[in-house]
Image (tube, rainbow, N blue to C red):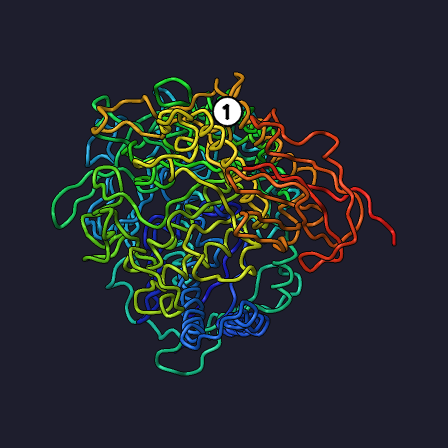
Amino acid sequence: MAVSFFPTTNHLFPIPFRESHSVLHGHLKLEIKLSPVSLAIAARRRSWKCNFSAQERTAKQQQRRKSEPVVDPVGFLSKVGISDRAFAQFLRERYKALKDRRFDLCSRFTDMMEASSGYEILGMHRHRQHRVDFMDWAPGSRYCAIVGDFNGWSPTENSAREGYYGHDDFGYWFIILEDKLRDGEEPDEFFFQEYNYVDDYDRGDSLNVEELLEKIDDEYWEPEEKFYRNSRLEFVAKLYEEIFGPNGPQTDEELGEIMDAETRYKQWKEKQKIDSNNRLPCYEVLDHGKTYDIENVILDPVSKEKFRAKKPPLAYWKEMCKGRKAWLKKYMPTISHGSRYRVYFNTPNGPLERVPAWATYLLPDPDGEKFCAVHWEPPPEAVHKWKNARPKVPKSLRVYECHVGISGAEPKVSSFNEFVSKVLPHIKEAGYNAIQLIGLVEHRDYSSVGYRVTNLFAVSSRYGTPDDFKRLVDEAHGLGLLVFLDIVHSYAAADELVGLSLYDGSNDCYFHSGKRGHHKHWGTRMYKYGDVDVLHFLLSNLKWWVTEYLIDGFNFHSLSSMFYTHNGFATFSGEMEEYCNQYVDKDALIYLILANEMLHDVHPNIITIAEDIVDVLVKNSQGSDKMLVYVENHNQSMSGGRSFADILLSKQAHKSSKREDMVLRGSSLLKMMKLITFTISGPAYLNFMGNEFGHPNRVEFPSPGNNYSFSYANRQWDLPRNEGLHCDQFNFDKDMTRLDEIEQILSKRLPNIHHVNDSVKVISYIRGPLLFIFNFHSEMSYELYNIGVEEAGEYQIILNTDETIYGGLGVLRRDQYLLRTISKRNDGYRNSLEVTLPSSSAQVYKLTRIARV
């Protein structure tokens, strides 16, 4: 079987076809059928690509496989001292499944970058050809429409039905909302006319299209290449004329008998003249004689080189675009900025209205029960313009965990703008170099602290607009602060009105069906990580936050919920079998591997943090060099819990007559807990908002249980500004973070813990040039206590938790801050220091002078 391919001329502008075009060639039917996804990608990406033959594609795939490094998925086990055979076999199987999953993704998408770029085409987007495109994934639906303020909430005015161009085989729906021509205005002369809406929006308003086309003819196109389409069917008409002549048959009776395709192809080939001056590409068709054969269209090398050498006319293309003023003069936007809308589905179980899964901004109705997506397309002058570049990633991270809603002092939900003006300067003063935002992604239930996420692509409208959040990130970057986002991909809210549960009427669209699709204790929904379209959704969500909001890192929340089918609610004994048995969700692990790889391809310096159970898996110090540690994060203060400050510093907690002494002792213990946690582990430390000055109260979000009170949903920022206990704690915390800023403690090798005396409760360790000594005894102080050191010389105290500016007693005099070593072996070292250790205190010594022997 052979098929005839006719050379066609280049077109100045690619056209987004919407229909299926068929041309009859004898017994063979050539059909061009483009799905909505393909249409949108073709219309938006507009990249110039050369199609390869089957042999070329196969050769490139084989070459790619050869160039890939050989990976031993279990080779690292020996480095961490693990020799479990079952775990090694599990890793081998997981690695094979990872390669299969990559193949599945690449069979649907060009590469991982495209697989994670769904936000470019899904959701609501302004198209350059005076229209708005909407795309969504709902494989269980039979009908899809957009309803909203702009069309009177009509489910029939803007729709796409199954079997039409608006629906493909994978369940993606595509709807075009055409801008309305204003009264008295004529349609555009050229159907490919485009407009600038934001970038260079003031250019092109006085464009003369005819003059520009003549300029393109003179400067760019060769004589043989000039061809402009005036309609979408012109190509089909010319192809028909090429086959049957200018006066071809118009009916089946006139058509008569048609020669077979091979004969027609040979006749056409004989007519082709070999002309070296002809700049049109030359084609050849190879047929292997098989009944069901895939033909290879071969482009001759000379034509191929000419094609590749020719640069695309992007400069002319940009010049062809008209400006925003010209667009608004001629057209009325079909959906205006701020319009509310929802997506309407007709399913086997009846009609549904949902908030689109890819919506980037939501607002509740006045009654607060029903949420709607908001079309966010502000005028160019209102769009946030980035001023500050991403800060350089420091060697060590001092992370400030915060929640925007409770960051204010007033009993209300605080805003992004208030956070920028009041909290960011405090964070900078406190010495932290990164912020981690929790509860930021849109969620319906405020009392859930933001962890029952309903809309993954939207910032919570409680705090402000998308541009307000961009300003927050921009200002944080200007202060040298990295911005991390606490992302919840481990489960989702079981909300059918706002969230993804039963999104298209089916129970297995985004989530597992049956019991596995529900968290065993929290009632949330569990994602189906093995599904290509779910991976497309989640990977695109991560890339969206990085590209749209310049997020610098992610904390993946509650990974044990997704790692195990028992959701982490099981007794872990520490046996390796527990991490590779039938309860491990291999698909979830593979998703995290793909997500981590993709994020580092997008932004090589991005920070990714996995929140999981690690103490039983990593039993030695080799895993600690990449750990983020904290005395307490937000969990200790919420959900009925109490922070350490609330326990140790609250006078109400100490009913004895010596409660002042107990508070002083609690204050000393809290400082020591911070210091030992800060300096004994890996390169990252985290503190929850307010704990740096010992915030006295728990955190309690408004809920029915407290009559929706905001009494404990705020922070008392005046406490560290007034003299007293909280000011003392804040002074210590600032000096502790400054110690890392100056001495780079967290980025140095892990400490050598060389002195542990349980009987007297003294611990000492060395990290770099610094010596840390802790006396945890609440009553006993020690004079001339011997601590071994390697280097002989002078050691100076650079931080002392017992100083009066930190609320201590100031037992050590200034003349005791500088000590010289003595030649006495201790703790395995040749030298030692004789130190004074006040009770409930810690000191940090620095080697300031080395004694030469």
Question: Quick check: 839 left or right of 533?
Answer: right
Report x, y in % for residue 74: 50, 72
Q: Which part of the image, by quadrant, shows the N terminus?
A: bottom left
Numbered disc 1: secondary structure: helix
Under mark 1, the amino acid is Val
Specify the quadrant of the image occupied by residue 236. Answer: bottom left
Report x, y in % for residue 56: 54, 71
Residue nearer the viewer, 191 or 431: 431
Question: Quick check: 404 left or right of 749?
Answer: left
**Is residue 204 in view?**
no
The residue that label 1 is drawn on is 423
Specify the quadrant of the image occupied by residue 533. Answer: bottom left
What residue do we see at 58% from left, 71% from top?
69
Report x, y in % for residue 89: 42, 76
Residue nearer the viewer, 545 or 325: 545
What residue do we see at 76% from left, 37% from top?
818
Residue nearer the viewer, 445 or 82: 82
